[in-house]
């Protein structure tokens, strides 16, 4: 395993700029890890002796735990840095943090930060391979990879599919990474949301913009719902949660405009009753939200594996 994957960059900072064969190879490797995970036979010696540090400056549940699980399933030593309790709160700069991490001989550094570009800055200063686990409103590459893997498992590929990304696109690094990945792999992408939550020049990324759910969802193969990111929002971008749900919340009636076998996706955490109805989120005929979480572990194992091997060879 691993040898089938073409040489990749030393870090995973963004999907933008990745080439189709690189993405496809990562997804293939992740698929094989998904099968190994289900059989319980993961290669626990793959990252033996390697140190993985999870450095999270922003809250996270599934991303942090899935990187931790991915590292442990491959035998790495995994450390979670509690940033709220660390010297960052005492005014230590990001670059001082980098120097500390270098002194610890960390091999793989997973970073989440509220500032777009923070993982890229760290990547220039640390010896470890850096994986962006979400930076501001910029990118969240492993989320896009796990979403793509989930879709591929159900549809056999990504080319020619029509995929809708709905809701708070403006604040969403998940949307940006998915737009780059899906358009690169030949899917047609539509973004749907109120004008206040769609970036003004997003069509330059090769997507179609809709402000009406019924029109935007027509004939789509997969519907990705996004969380309303109230914490990144200036006041007044959305009226009330109730009104938002009426126009943009995914319920059975709106979903009926998509293909009868459309997949329903959400990166989590979900605001049930705001961007998605519980009945749809939990509908086994459509929802693949739990499978997304499962694929998250497999994708992160593939990424850690490839970057650790790249580091060992370079
Ligand atoms: C996303 C994130 O943090 O960017 N969550 C995640 O990683 N599963 C999306 C969000 O916070 O809404």
Image: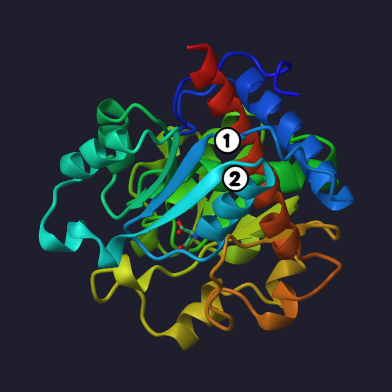
Picture residue at 68% right of the left edge, 19% below the top: 5
- Position of residue 73 relative to residue 307, above or below, is below
Residue that extends furthest to the left in the rendered view of this protein: 91
- Give the quarter of the figure containing the N terminus: top right
Q: Secondary structure at mark 1?
A: helix
Rendering colour mode: rainbow
Q: Residue at x 68, y 81 (%)?
A: 278
The picture places residue 204, in percent across and down from the top left corner, at 41, 34
> At which x and y percent is residue 56?
37, 56
User: Eyeballing the image, is 66 above or below 302?
Assistant: below
Q: Is residue 133 left or right of residue 104?
A: right
Q: Position of residue 94 (x, y in %)?
A: 20, 45
Q: Is mark 2 within 8 Å of ligand 1?
A: no
Q: Classify 10 Å Cα crowding around label 1: few (below 14), some (14-19), many (20 and above).
A: many
According to the image, label 1 marks what residue?
304
Name the spot of residue 38 as percent of width and height, x first.
85, 51
Q: Which of marks 2 and 1 precedes in the sequence?
A: 2
Residue corresponding to mark 2: 71
State the SS at label 2: helix
Residue drawn at (58%, 14%) of the image: 7
């Amino acid at each position: 395993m691993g040898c089938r994957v073409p040489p990749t960059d030393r870090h995973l900072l963004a999907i933008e700029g990745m080439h189709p064969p690189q993405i496809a190879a990562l997804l293939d490797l992740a698929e094989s890890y998904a099968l190994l995970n289900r059989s319980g036979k993961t290669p626990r010696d793959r990252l033996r002796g390697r140190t993985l540090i999870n450095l999270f400056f922003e809250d996270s549940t599934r991303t942090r735990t899935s990187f931790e699980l991915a590292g442990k399933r491959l035998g790495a030593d995994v450390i979670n840095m509690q940033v709220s309790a660390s010297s960052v709160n005492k005014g230590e700069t990001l670059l001082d943090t980098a120097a500390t991490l270098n002194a610890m001989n960390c091999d793989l550094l997973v970073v989440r930060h509220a500032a777009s570009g923070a993982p890229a800055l760290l990547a220039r200063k640390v010896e470890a391979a850096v994986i962006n686990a979400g930076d501001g409103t910029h990118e969240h590459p492993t989320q896009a990879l796990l979403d793509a893997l989930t879709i591929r498992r159900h549809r056999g590929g990504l080319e020619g599919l029509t995929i809708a990304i709905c809701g708070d696109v403006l604040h969403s690094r998940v949307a940006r990474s998915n737009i780059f990945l899906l358009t690169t792999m030949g899917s047609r992408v539509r973004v749907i949301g109120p004008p206040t939550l769609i970036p003004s020049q997003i069509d330059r990324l090769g997507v179609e913009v809709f402000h009406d759910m019924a029109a935007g969802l027509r004939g789509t193969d997969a519907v990705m719902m996004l969380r309303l990111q109230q914490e990144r929002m200036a006041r007044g971008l959305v009226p009330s949660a109730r009104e938002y749900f009426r126009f943009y919340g995914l319920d059975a009636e709106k979903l009926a405009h998509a293909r009868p076998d459309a997949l329903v996706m959400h990166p989590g955490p979900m605001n049930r009753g705001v961007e998605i109805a519980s009945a749809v989120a939990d509908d086994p005929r459509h929802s693949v939200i739990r499978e997304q979480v499962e694929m998250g572990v497999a994708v992160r194992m593939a990424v850690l594996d490839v970057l650790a091997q790249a580091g060992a060879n370079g």
